[in-house]
Image (tube, rainbow, N blue to C red):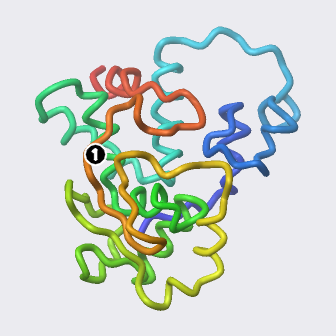
Amino acid sequence: MTKRTRAKHKLDRRMGENIWGRPNSPVNKRSYGPGQHGQRRKSKMSDFGLQLRAKQKLKGYYGDVTEKQFKATYLDASKMKGDTGQNLIGLLEQRLDMVVYRAKFAPTVFAARQIVNHGHILVNGVKCNIPSRRIRVGDVISLGNKAKEMALIIEAQSLPEREIPDYVSTDGNDKVTFTRVPTLDEVPYPVRMEPNLVVEFYSR
């Protein structure tokens, strides 16, 4: 299991963007970086710096997965036919914790991972507690009986700041079907993601 041990909003401050689109992000009030030098004029970033930033932002958005896991996903994407950047996004969106998040079963991707870890999610009717499991087209993801009564999940389903994307088809409030692997422009990112720079970073 991957934990984010640092404060989640520090990534927002460091990037200067509201990565997850949450209303309580400190970037909404302070768009500059953290620390006493956060308001200094920013110097032009090198190509390597831009690539690293793009990687850290994308990796952080998906629950701050470990570097080993993220690079393994990139390597899988590079072996597939087609555009590697698009493949990378598709594989990340196929993670079970992301499908749970997209289905609005959890308010954040971190909460989605916890819900999966605690055994509250069923894949095709079978309990699964592996957040990184790769979901296939046609798989049905549903809430366990206890999860249907959890305040966290009820709260997540009422959140107004995001909608369930088209590639996750709902069946009531407790079941969804993953209908297709999305392309970059279909994924509802609150900020601009640049998987092409991530590809350049790993291709060096």
- Residue drawn at (19%, 32%) of the image: 78
Residue drawn at x 40%, y 21% as measured from the top left: 197
Q: Secondary structure at mark 1?
A: helix
Instruction: Count up the numbered dots.
Output: 1
Residue 89, placed above or below residue 138:
above
Residue in the picture at 48% in, 12% down: 47
| Residue furthest top as drawn | 44
Tell whether 2 sits left or right of 44: left
Whether residue 27 is visible, yes or no, is yes
Q: Is residue 84 left or right of residue 59?
A: left
Instruction: Say few, some or many: other residues with alpha carbon within 10 Å of mark 1 (under 14 / 14 to 19 / 20 or more).
Output: some
Q: Considering the image in quadrants, where does the C terminus appear?
A: top left
Q: Position of residue 140 (x, y in %)?
A: 27, 68
When asked about the image quadrant of residue 100, the answer is bottom left
Q: Is residue 72 visible?
A: no
State the image coordinates of residue 68 (x, y, percent, origin top left): 33, 50
The answer to whether residue 82 is left or right of residue 29 is left
Residue 56 % position (x, y): 51, 37
Q: Quadrant of residue 176?
A: bottom left
Residue at the front extreme, as displayed: 172
Quadrant location of the N terminus in the rendered image: bottom left
Q: Nearer the viewer, residue 99 or 177?
A: 177
Place of residue 158 in the rendered image (x, y in percent of width and height, measured from the top left) = 65, 64
141 is higher (above) or lower (below) than 151: above
Q: Residue at x 31, y 42 (%)?
A: 71
- In the rendered view, tell whether residue 166 sits above or below residue 8: above
- Identify residue type, mark 1: Leu
Per the image, the residue denoted by label 1 is 91
Answer above or below: position of 153 versus 182. below
**Quadrant in the picture for residue 73:** top left
